[in-house]
Amino acid sequence: MSHGIQLIELIRELEQRRHVFLQDPMQVTRRLAASDTPHVERLYLRAQQIDQDQQLQRQLARVSQRIQRVSRWVTLLWLVLGAVGVWLLLQSDQVNFFAVLFAILGMHTLLLLVWLLTFWIKRRQVATLPHWVLKRLPQDTVSQALASFWTQRFLRGRERWLGFRLSHQLWFASLLGVLIGLLVLLVTRQYSFSWQSTLLDTSTLVWMVQVLSWLPAQVGFAVPDAAAVASSRLVAPTEVARDWAGLLVGSIVCYGLIPRGLLWLLCWWMQRRPESLDLNASYYQKILKRWQRRELVDPDDSPVLPVSLAKSQINSIHPRLACLLDTPLEDVTAGWSEHVLGMDWPMQSAIMDREQLTELLAYLAAHPVQLLVGLRLHILPDRGVLRRLEQLEQAAAGGVIVALISTGDADPVRREQWQTALTERGLEMTFLNVKPSDEAIACNP
């Protein structure tokens, strides 16, 4: 299901960027409302139907294949660089043991400890793709959405473990190249190992070598004893070279290859764990709410009843805001949005054209609010009006409540038309009766 979740998340990213699909996501959502499949599987079916030509699935597969291909070639490159590096390091037959050991394992051990330390520290996430890289990507919506999608997945998704695994894989390949190159040199050349120090005396170096050689000795590698360490200061006796070489190889294996290999296995196992969707996200909650409302309405053969909102249904997390859609301000009583459902809704604007709608959508994208949309009840619920309501509902983080405003006796036919249309789209509604002689608006339950 991993590829399915990737497709679902990419559809979400594109919808939030207002990408135009071959299939209208709202229509696909309504078609799947009667399905009894689990929510995650239904979201996957929805994503497949939206991606009718499978272009998005092919692009996701192409990116995954490219990541695998690049990782293989880079791993091979690090393997070769490790072998070349140790060959350059051991050009002389007289070798300072600690200098060579530090050159091979020093940076590796430091970065390994930093990774282990920072792995458990919660810190602010930063973008993994630099700004200049994003600017050089194609500027179409799909390419930008893919860049944002993979950035977020490497930060918080399962691909975060893929990034960790690739890091350990590269270091493992580098150390494996070092080990292979070192073994070839030790087999074909005669080296003499010594040590030098201005501050440390022989007894201290003997103790350090004993600590260092404990684990390799347990595995079975030959290690120098105290006498060999003492005799190797400044001079390089060839009779103990085999023991020093065993300690060098054993240190690379025990302190380099084994820890990296175990961490690679850990990341590989974590990456293979089942992936889940965060269904509590507002994007998925809106879709599930439409399906749940439809599931409650469809089995009932009785006429559609008005949706009556209780005060408890008003989202208290987001600020409230009101606007009029296709309804001039002069056509409604001043203060129409006061005391609606027991709450006051500050008036934003009257949306009469596309430019005003675009400005409101931009405002909603930057400010998470719950929106009360006022509509004259006599307006026909045609496709254009419903489409604008759907756009507002998608943009409003706290959702949309549609207030159908009448100034007298409501047309029962038009009222039923609005009830049917809004219920099918999972939009909450209420009815407001504006009495011409009053400045107040009463909520008609």
Image (cartoon, rainbow, N blue to C red):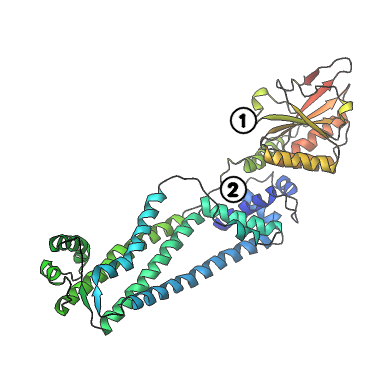
What's the residue type where badge 1 is placed?
Answer: Ile
Which image quarter holds the C terminus?
top right
Tell me which residue sits at (13%, 61%) in the image. Answer: 203
Q: At which x and y percent is residue 49?
A: 70, 55
Tell me which residue sits at (36%, 71%) in the image. Answer: 176
Q: Which mark is residue 257?
A: none
Q: Is residue 411 visible?
A: no
Residue 252 vs 380, above or below: the answer is below
What's the residue type where badge 2 is placed?
Answer: Val
Asked if the residues shown at circle 1 and circle 2 are in contact, with their CB atoms under 8 angstroms apart, the answer is no
Query: Tag 2's secondary structure?
Result: helix
List the residue tagged with mark 2: 40
Q: In this rendered view, identify the residue nearer to me: 330 or 195.
A: 195
**Is residue 159 shown left or right of residue 106?**
right
Q: Is residue 360 visible?
A: yes
Q: In this rendered view, identify the residue nearer to me: 126 or 23.
A: 126
Q: Residues within 10 Å of mark 2 (few under 14, many from 20)?
A: some
Q: At which x and y percent is residue 389?
A: 78, 39
